[in-house]
Amino acid sequence: MGFVTGMLTGMRRRNIDPAMQLAGLDIDLADADSRVPVDRYATLYNRVIAALGDEGFGLFSARMRPGSFEFLCRGMLGAASLADGLDRARRFLSIVLPDMVVSIHRIGGRAELRIAELTPLTADPDDPARVFAFEWLLRLLHSLSCWLVGRGLALDSVDFPFPRPAHADDYALVYTERSTFVGGSLLTARFNATLLDLPIRRDEAALTTFLEGAPGRISMLYRRDRATVLRVRDLIRAALPASLSQDEVAVRLHMSPRTLHRRLDEEGASFRGIKEALRRDIALARLTKTRQPIARIAADLGYADTSAFYRAFTGWTGLSPERYRRQLANSAAPDDSDDA
């Protein structure tokens, strides 16, 4: 409930009764200990934004106009790596969200995502509006990063710049068990620096589907209790070269095919997309790091014939497997030209 009341603080500051936005959601604001289903939370998220005309929930000195989230996604989508994508996000947010400053730092083998409060939102460090502003922006950047690279990204620790809120126990579910509450105006989220080198895997078609129900849908993705994508990916990989069907995976996960489809959809994924992404990742790794025959790679990935693998690989990269391997070899060849 702490996340709900935080989201509504901007409306209350403007003396706007949120009754219309809460209608039909069965959310009792007076019951601080109640749990809110995540799909209802996402619906409320979108309703509040629509009512205020502000994707920043009325928390900041300038409105974050509707459509900002979509353009944030589109800007990051064309990046080569997560590091590049987050740098694009940083620059975009400096335009639409001037009260907060986002930065990314590599420190040895660790990386830090920092969110600094440039313009104080309130004089009270534990004001629910200020608390939610930091919670929301970290959640937004973390979940969007997970979706873009197609996997959950573990946060090793987070320092939040406010006193421990009443709903802090839920931080273990949403962020990490290693959440600490410190003073100052800087949030620091730490994670393995190698994650910054992950490639952006989503394309325009995936983004079109992802934006249905956005930006509220971002709140439904990559919670620590929603690791269905990783479980499905692990089962598919372990079964290779056999090709598991969605129904077979559902049985192994002790759920119905319909439930599996729903959970994957909530995490911004699909069974077919997971299978194709896994095959693509393995194929690229084998072509890059081994000299295995292409027919063997195709068989190991469960393709009934090599021609089907060729069609799939060309769809992924625009190149045939042989041409992809030749280009890698040519790029790795020593340059005999004179130094400039």
Image (cartoon, rainbow, N blue to C red):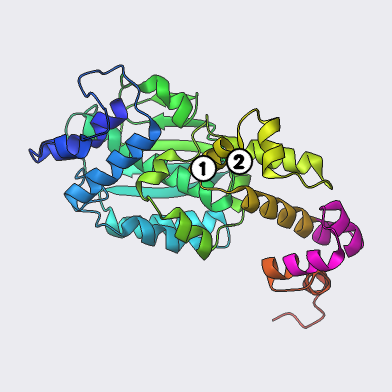
Q: Which residue is mark 1?
A: 267
**Rendering coords of residue 17 (x, y %):** 11, 36
Evaluate if marks 1 and 2 touch, with contact meaning CB atoms under 8 Å apart.
yes
Distance (Cα) linking label 1 and label 2: 7 Å
- Of residue 259 and residue 37, the one placed in the foreground of this image is 259
In this rendering, the answer to whether 27 lies above or below 332 is above
In this rendering, the answer to whether 186 lies above or below 30 is below
Res. 135 visible in picture: no
**Rendering coords of residue 121 (x, y %):** 20, 40
- What quarter of the picture does the C terminus occupy? bottom right
Badge 1 amino acid: Glu
In this rendering, the answer to whether 215 lies above or below 123 is below
Badge 2 amino acid: Val
Numbered mark located on residue 229 in the image: 2
Disc 2: CA contacts within 10 A as few (<14), some (14-19) or many (>=20):
many
Asked which secondary structure carries label 2, the reply is helix
In this rendering, the answer to whether 72 lies above or below 41 is below
**Rendering coords of residue 61 (x, y %):** 17, 49
Instruction: Give, as a single range, the part of the protein colored magenta.
Output: 286-312
